Image (cartoon, rainbow, N blue to C red):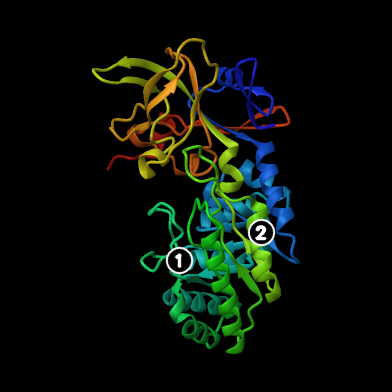
Amino acid sequence: MGFDYRENKLHCDGVSMQEMASRVDTPFYCYSADIIREHFCRYRDQFSMPDSVVCYAVKANSNPSVLGLLGGLGAGADVVSAGELRQALDAGISPERIVFSGVAKTAAEMRFGLENDIFQFNVESESELEALSRTATSLGCEAPVAFRINPDIDAGTHEKITTGKAVNKFGIPRSRASEVYARAAGLPGIRVQGIATHIGSQLTDLAPFEQSFRCHARLVQTLREQGHDISVLDIGGGLGIDYRDGAPLPPRVESYAALAREILEPLDCRILVEPGRSIVGEAGVLVSQVIYVKEGEQVCFLIIDAGMNDLLRPSLYDAHHEITAVCPAGGTVRPYDVVGPVCETGDTFARQLDLPPMSPGELVAIRNAGAYGAVMASTYNSRPLAPEVMVDEGRVSLVRRRIEADEELVMDTLP
């Protein structure tokens, strides 16, 4: 069902957002379990090659209810910290379906992954390789490894979320791949099994993916000729969603998977794919209440109780999020600058946005906020983190309560 209007009121999976707001103080995040299921199952059904795994990118939204829902559907996990690994395991995701990515894994994090017998470490540097070898050797085990290869591909996305160019911090340069794989083959505690690549986020064109997949295919052939047993290909994630900002529409999962099958299936490797945003992005909204309507000299400000600490993307990336009234009133629309309470000019969600006449106490929904919303939130200005709600088959569950200021203060001590 997802988000739709019924009798001029926004609903989530059949539940009125207005009624929800009367039970959960604003601002709060609301997730649709139906949308999450639909989007994950599309990946699972399309990536049906033998032994392929859809490893959900936990960094997109790590709420335990989201992880538990996906784990129950058969998802694996792509994690980038020991904390995310622990969350995935606690949610019931099998360690045999977990990949550990990230450029700065510590020895303690490596040890935690090895002790839990995860499927693969995506190694991003020679220094990390040496550290992983030492850690695995100290435990008397072998670390299953894929090297993340940086193919120097411009994915055409925002500069802060591109990851596959030579100037980015991620991965090992393609030109040094043979050298690094040869080094790994001679190290104790290392078992090389695959290749990994991830070129960026919010991609809306298949062409960069095709470049990346063909780079994979060529490298597999080269490494096999050099004696390496390459059996796993981790193709990353990055497929975008429609933020309704006028940008090109992202490709369908079906087209993305068909391209992967065409180029990679002949290699007879296990395929891992790591979607995050495209599973949960459209499944969440941030609900906020209007506090004041302020008539400025040139602009009318709609001041809401959600701030950049709750949803950082507009401030950090100049990202567009559609904003709609939860219960639209009649009358002629007018332009508002939608702003939050944080003491920063950058605490702005939209400029000159046409909305129906709004008054204090009314509600707005900031759409497509299920990915990189709550997980990037902070307590800046000593504001408590927003609670999170999930709707599943008409049932509303508070899946993360608000942590109030007095609870935060308990963690502080005076010298």
In the rendered image, the vertical position of residue 252 relative to residue 264, given as above or below? above
Q: Decide which of 248, 178 is in the foreground and name it.
A: 248
SS type, badge 1: loop
Are the residues flagged by discs 2 and 1 in contact, CB closer than 8 Å? no
Residue at the location (64% across, 62% down)? 259
Where on the picture, by quarter, is residue 395?
top right
Q: Decide which of 405, 153 is in the foreground and name it.
A: 153
Spatial CA span between label 2 and label 1: 19 Å
SS type, badge 2: helix
Q: Is residue 67 left or right of residue 106?
A: right
In the rendered image, the vertical position of residue 283 relative to residue 112, given as above or below? above
Query: In the rendered image, which residue does mark 1 sit on?
Result: 153
Whole-percent x, y for residue 332 in the image: 45, 12
Q: Earlier in the sequence, mark 2 or mark 1?
A: 1
Can the viewer see residue 34 in this picture? yes
Neighbours of disc 1 within 10 Å: few (<14), some (14-19), many (20+): some
Query: In the rendered image, which residue does mark 2 sit on?
Result: 257
Work out which quarter of the rendered image holds the C terminus and state it: top left
Amino acid type at image mark 1: Ile
